[in-house]
Image: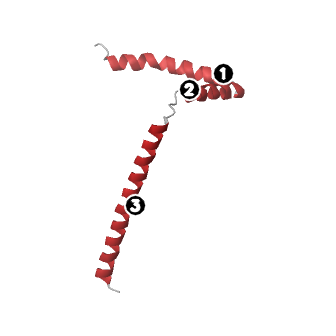
Amino acid sequence: MSESPSESVSANSAPAAKKRSASSDKRGFFGRIALFVRQVVAELKKVHTPTRSELFTYTAVVIVFVAAIMAFVTLLDFGIGKLVLWVFGD
């Protein structure tokens, strides 16, 4: 029987995973910190800073969404309060 493609990939990737874990074990404490800092800097280079108009748009969307959720929760609270007063009385 032949192996399926997923089995052959998982079988071939196991030694690579062992190599990576072995190389990370060889690094000392400061080497791991340096690797972390390099990875953080690399991720921060990918960050897109919004333009002024995008920032205003995103802010407006968030404020409108929060206001809508506040109105919904307020109405729900008012309705449940009225229901409880109707069921249990004053």
- Residue 31, given in percent of the width and then of the height, sits at 69, 24
Q: Which residue is mark 1?
A: 26
Label 2 – label 1 distance at C-alpha: 28 Å
Which residue is depicted at the point 45% across and 46% down? 59
Q: Quadrant of residue 35?
A: top right
**Residue receiving disc 3:** 70
Dot 3 alpha-carbon crowd within 10 angstroms: few under 14, some 14 to 19, many 20 or more: few
Q: Is 9 on the left or on the right of 52, as rendered?
A: left
Query: To which quarter of the image does residue 87 belong?
Result: bottom left
Tell me the residue that label 2 is attached to: 45
Q: Secondary structure at mark 1?
A: helix
- The relative height of residue 55 versus residue 86 in the rendered view (above or below) is above
- Check disc 2 and report its element: helix, strand or loop: helix
Q: How far, Cα to Cα, is label 1 from label 3?
A: 53 Å
Q: How would you rate the neighbour count of disc 1 (Cα within 10 Å): few for under 14, some for 14-19, many for 20 or more? A: few
**Front in this rendered view, residue 63 or 46:** 63
Give the residue at the far top of this rendering.
Answer: 2
Q: Look at label 2 and name its amino acid.
A: Lys
